[in-house]
Each structure stands twice: as C-alpha cells, then as structure tokens.
Image: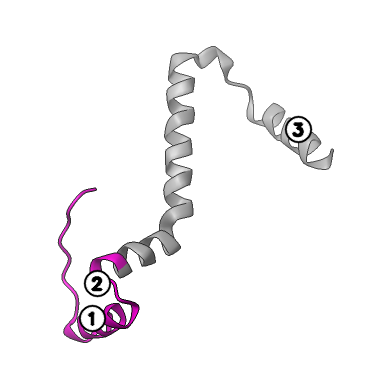
Amino acid sequence: MKRTMIYLPEQTHEGLRKLAFEANTSIAELIRQAIDAIYSEDIEDIQDMEEELIKYQAHPESAIELQKYLRQRKAHVSA
C-alpha cells in the first residue's frame, strides 16, 4: 500500500469524520472505498491494456487488423 496526502475542505473532512465514526472505520478507509467504487473498473481496464501491450511487444506478429478483429468479435457475440 502506498501513502498519499490530500487536502480536503473542512466541511468535507468533518462529514467524513462523522461517517467514519458511525461506520466504526477510518476516514482513509472511507476514501479507499469511494475510490474503489468510482474507479476500480477503469483501473482494471488500464491493467488489462498494459498486459495486452506487453504481449504485443513480445509478439507483434500476433496482431490482427481492426476489421478482422471486429468481425471476430461480432461473430463471437452473436453466437
């Protein structure tokens, strides 16, 4: 886990402090949960893209033309 520092408006901090108390957790955990709820799918997409890029860089001959890929995808979805 990495540590980071953020600045929050006082009103936001106070609201989070109350929510954290009610949930018996920390402000940091509430922020982590909010980030996961909002950005987890985007982060997974980035990780998937990075993995695919590594595969392509290792084997560029495995690439196919976009039109061929789209036809294969359409056929797969229709099946």
**Measured along the vertical axis of the image, is residue 9 above or below residue 29?**
below
| Residue 27, numbered circle | 2
**Measured along the vertical axis of the image, is residue 50 above or below residue 24?**
above
- Residue at 45% in and 52% down: 42
Q: Residues within 10 Å of mark 2 (few under 14, many from 20)?
A: some
- Residue furthest right in the image: 79
Question: Which amino acid does the dot numbered 3 rest on?
Answer: Arg
Between 38 and 63, the residue placed more toward the observer is 38
Q: Which is in the foreground here, disc 1 or disc 3?
A: 1
- Residue furthest front in the image: 24
Using residue 56 as the reference point, say whether residue 78 is left or right of it: right
Between 7 and 73, the residue placed more toward the observer is 7
Question: Which amino acid does the dot numbered 2 rest on?
Answer: Ile
| Residue 71, numbered circle | 3
Tag 1 residue: 17
Q: Is residue 39 magenta?
A: no
Snapshot quadrant of residue 15: bottom left
Instruction: Work out how far the residue at label 3 is from the one at label 2, CA to CA, in angstroms.
Output: 48 Å
Q: Which is in the foreground here, disc 3 or disc 2?
A: 2
Question: Which amino acid does the dot numbered 1 rest on?
Answer: Arg
Label 2 SS: helix
